[in-house]
Every structure is written in structure tokens, then in C-alpha cells.
Amino acid sequence: MLTDAIKSDIQTAYSTFLKNRELRARQGQRLMVAQIARTLGNIQTASDGIRTSGPHVCAIEAGTGTGKTLAYLVSSLPVAKERDKRIVVSTATVALQEQLIFKDLPDLKTYAEIQFKYALAKGRSRYLCLSRLEQALEDANGADPAQSTLSLFDEFLQTNTSKEATALYQEMAQHYLSGKWEGDRDSWKDSLEEPVWRRITTDHNQCTNRRCSNFSSCAFFKARNELDDADIIVANHDLVLADLSLGGGIVLPDPQDTIYIFDEGHHLPDKAIDHFAGSFRVNASLQWLRLLKKSLSDLNSELGQDPLIVKQLNQLPDILNNLEVELAECYRQLHEITQFSPENMDRDIRPVHRFEKGVVPEALVQSALNLKISFAGLCQKLEIMVKQLKDAMDPETSGPLGREEGEQWLPLATMLHSRSVAAWELWGMYATPQAEDVMPIARWITLQNQQVDIDLEVSCSPISAAGTLARNLWQPCFGAVLSSATLTALGSFERIRTRAGLPEDADCLVVPSPFDFASNGVLELPEEACDPTQADLHTRQIVSFIKNKVITDEGTLVLFSSRRQMRDVLDKMPAHLVNSILVQDDLTKQVLLERHRSRVDKDEGSIIFGLASFAEGIDLPGKYLSHVVITRIPFSVPDDPVEKTLSEWIEAKGGNPFLQITVPDASIRLVQAVGRLLRTESDTGRISLLDRRVQTKRYGKQILNSLPPFRRAF
């Protein structure tokens, strides 16, 4: 239970922080502290510390300015220490991770006068692999007799041994060995292109852990050791999901000993769906399979000392021949099903064929089953080869292969094995007939460009993360907190409960924002607002509004739902306005925002044209943003295969997908968009919504009522 000692620790830390920072307590922040303390403090445990009963998850919506980071840290840390648990704070963005590590956590230690350790957790692929670095430098010296074989796979291994890359690798080696660099990608002095970095990093499958001769000097495991001593670990949603999918406790602490705090928690369901989605490009896969077939004699020559590997290699020709035949037949079936016309492709749109309700034709199910079986055989052979190559790198083991062979060939073997496993999983999803009354898997085919040829991409995805999160996260974890400015939709937690699979007894709370929305902000529906379904008229009205109603010497953000419309509007802008406009596609987000701030600082004014990614996570306080223009209600793209399949499922159950999914999702996006305006209690400005449907459609009132209480001017 929530003991008096824990209450006292929380109250002391909170009041000390406020006093030292000369801050006033905010009502919403206090309510949030109390709710988290109640939920986590009242968890019942057995004598071994394992959770036995009681609500252990809470979801709290807290708007900008609440101070939710302090609230969840100061309320969870005393509980975690008392229960001998550890805290994992997971975010959706790098910006929030950096804020936690470099500002919020140091501030908590200093101003709350409490002692704890914290660390940042990253996946292996963010760290230098010394063995891969050594290999890259050896390859550059031309000492590798097998380089001609490996070079066939350069495109898939993303290798780079140019003179420039080699010089960079030599500099990296010097900096790491001298202690000037800790070996993680994010702290290198310059940005690194993906192919250059991929050559010298590794992943869970390739890493040989303690068997590696560089284990004691490994950047990843040095950082991992810091996690073992940390009371609070900062991670991201992708890393948490990856760790949980491997059973938990691989990179992060064991879930049953962990209190998870998901900041930006509204992203978690979609991140989980993406994590378990899969895709397979037929021609691209045929390419690497044929390269493997072509390389078998060289592989036998290079790895022939190991009889177990030779046995696997000798069995691969039959498997690869079968796969070629089966993929050719599958490709023919897919073309017959889709009837794609490559002439219809353009820069933004790829033709998509979606299988209604996730049901694929029987002939394709049979082809998928054949491919699943063949890829299972390939996985088995490659898994044995990977194990033998990892064993070869064990300094304490003497085998037919040496460390050099292991380091040389392990990246290729693990790449082939990972691709085979992914293919086996995808075709397994297609080979499983869609059962009635069971939530379907979304399945679809996309026409893609592949250099000069076209390719067919076969994809599938769960349409809900609820079951996955319930099994892998909520059930095993000790406790969890979801926090975000947008957890409710149309005033209800039902959407996040359903999509995230929250436990039925999860505590849910909305805490008040400290902002005076009515005094500081205006929401207007200008005369230019019209129905966006009249596309040409809507574009003309946006142009007219920007030309006549936007004040050019202040900071303005114009949010579009369509890249094409954004470009059309830009093309119709007069020259004097074009010079004031910064367009999302033309610059990186960081550079664009820096230029915007610089212009505003010079009193020149600046207008940003942005898409959905600029409706969230953009922080432009004060004079940097005085006017937000939202061109339309941000309904989701109507042709998204996952959303369409989910809609069909809801309809089959007698529901209304537009009212149950589309409108709530749009309301959340709109709340995020209007949230760009007021970032501090002293900010002021206006929001212009150029979509008349909030007045003319029945759902309009629901959407308006879900927005913060700005003063309305319509």
C-alpha cells in the first residue's frame, strides 16, 4: 500500500524542488502526482516482490504547461526505491529523450535534493562494433581473398569501403581507443550517412556477446553496464517493444521488476502495430537468393574446414531452386490478382491492392504455404551456419574455423538468416486462412519501383496492438504510466483503452492545464473557410486567406493534410510571399526551425508550410508562433490498408467506423495541431481553421468541444 513513508518522500521531494526553483505548485501537476502515487503505491505484491493484484496501470492526460515530467518522476521514484524496482521512461522522440537526460533528470537531482542514478538506453545499432570496424579497415587494405564474393552482397550488407569511408573509420578508431569518443552514433561530431554507419555497427542477431574478442572494450556493453546501476533508464518506444518481443530483460530490466512510464504515450499503439508488421519484395528477394546460389561454391571454398557448415551448404541448392520456382509462380499470381498498371505510378502514390477483410485467394494461400515451408528450411540451414560462425569467434573454443573467418562471414550469414526469418514470418501470415469472428490481419500488395524494373511488395499488419500489448507489456510489468497531452478522444479514454489493450481496472485521469486559453488564444473560422471536398475551391480559398489575412511580419505555421495541396498553394503564392515561406520538404526540420527563429528574431516574419509531422512536437514559444492556420480537419488517409481493414471489421460487428475511428482520430490530431500555439502561460495568438465542416456536419460540434476552450470568433 501507499505507506506514510512513501507519501512523505514524495511530498518532500516535490516541495523541495518547487522551493529551490522558486515555482508555484500547479493544480494539474499535483493531481497527477497524487494519481501516480496511488496507482503505483497500492500495488499488492507477494513476498518475492512480484505483483499479485490491484490496479497497476494509469493513463493521465496532461496538457502543455502541466509539468508532467516532474510529476511522473517525483511520484514514481520513491515507490520504485521502496519496492526495489527500476523505472524505464520511454518517449517517442529523440528531442524528449535529450530533454530528460540533459535537463529534467539533472534538475530533479539538484533541486529536489534526492540521490539516484540514470542512464540512456539505446539499441546495439546505435553503437560502434569494434569487430566490424576492424573488418572494414582490413577490407580496405585489400587483404581479404573473399572480398569478391562478399562484394556481391554489398547492396544488402550496405558496405562502404571508399577512401573517404576508410579515412573516417581510421579517425573513429583513433577517437574511440583514445577515449575521445564513447562509440555511439549520436555523439560523433558529424552526421553519418546510413551506409557508412551500417558497415561498422551490429544488431542482436550478429552480436556474439562474450564470445567476441572485443567484448571487454565494446561500446554497447559498456553502456549496458551503466544501465545495471541506473534507477531510471530513458529509452524509446521502439527499443521497449523490441526488448519485450524478445521476452523482456534483454537490454532493459525484466518487466516484472520495472515501472514503465510512457511519455508521448498516445504513440504506443501505432508503434506496436508497426513493430509487428511485415513486408516482402518479390524481385528484390529473388536477387539475394540468386546471389546466395551463385556464391555457394565460394562459400564452400572459404568455409570448407567446418564439416557442419559444408553439410548445410550442400543442402541449399535444392531449397534455393524450389524458392525460385515458387516465387516465380507467386509473382505470376500476384500480377494476375492486382492487374497493376505501372503508368499510374507517380512520386507520391503507389498502386495498392488490398485484400478485403484480410482474405486472400485460396491459390495464394497455397503458394504462401509452399514459400513458408521452403523459407523454414532455409532458416534452419542458415541458423546452423550462424551458430558455427559465432562459435568460431569464441576465444575459449577451438574449432575448425578461426576468429577471422567468423568475423568475415558472420555479417553475411546473419543478414541472410534475418531476411529468411522475416520472409518465413510474412508468408506464414499469408498461409494462415482468415478465420471468422477473429480480428483480421491486414494484407495488401503494392507496386514499387526497383531501379529500372518494377517490383511487387507483399505486406501484412495487425490492425490492433491491444492483444500484443496486453500479453507482452501490461500483464508482465510491475506497473506502468501513460502520459500525453492527447490521450482522450472526444472527451473519452475509450480509444486509448481499446487500441492499447489497457487493463480494465486501469486508472484514467484528465488533469487541468494551467493555460488561460480563453484570454490568450482565439479560434476563428474565417469567411474563406469552405468544404475541403471541393478541392479546387478549397485551394483557392487557402491562397486567398494567406495573401490577405496572414500578417507577414509575425511567426505563422500553416498545416496541410496533403503534400500535393501544399505544393499547389505554394505555386499560387505571389513572389513577395514566397520569400517568406519555409517549406517542410525543402529543408530538414531542424534547419527549417532555426531559419524560422532567425527570421522572427530579425523582425522579418516567417511562414512555415508543414504537413502532419509539424502538427506535433514543434515547440515555438512566444513571438516565434503567433498564428496557426489549419487548412482542414486532419482526417486519416482513406486508402490506408490497415485503417480500411479495421473499418471493415468494425462494420462487420455492427459498428460505425467513421464515428468510432475516423472522427476520434481526427479530433486528437486537431488537438495536437492547435496545441502548437500556446507553449507557455504568457503566449498569445490565434488559430484559423479553414474547414467549414465543423459547422455544417453533425460531428463538427463533437470535434470543437474536444478542443481547448479558446475564445471563438465564428
Image (cartoon, rainbow, N blue to C red):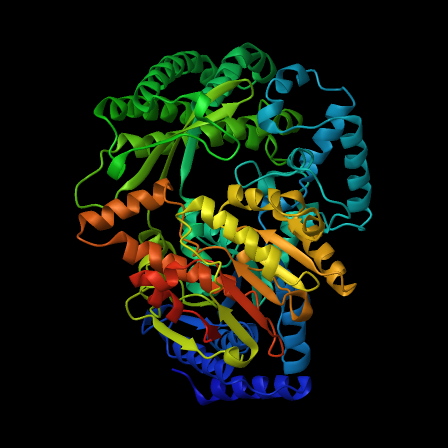
What residue do we see at 50% from left, 31% from top? 387
Residue 448 visible here: yes
- The residue sitting at 61% across, 55% down in the picture is 547
Q: Is residue 599 above or below residue 73?
A: above
Is residue 700 shown left or right of residue 190? left
For the residue pair 601 and 409, the one nearer the viewer reads as 601
Residue 552 on image: x %, y %: 68, 60
- Quadrant in which the N terminus is drawn: bottom left
Left or right of 396 on screen, residue 336:
left
Could you tell me if residue 45 is visible in this image?
no
**Residue 422 sits in quarter:** top left
In the image, residue 372 lies at what x, y percent?
33, 26
Residue 244 appears at what percent x and percent y?
43, 52
Nearer the observer, 4 or 315: 4
Q: Is residue 292 left or right of residue 659?
A: right
Residue 641 position, x and y percent, is 35, 40
Instruction: Say if 482 sits above or below 149 in the image.
Output: below
Q: Quadrant of the C terminus?
A: bottom left
Image mark count: 0
Of residues 482 and 425, the one drawn nearer to the viewer in this rendering: 482
Task: Tell me which corner region of the image, top left, top right, bottom left or bottom right, holds residue 420.
Answer: top left
Asked if 507 appears above or below 221 in the picture, the reply is: below
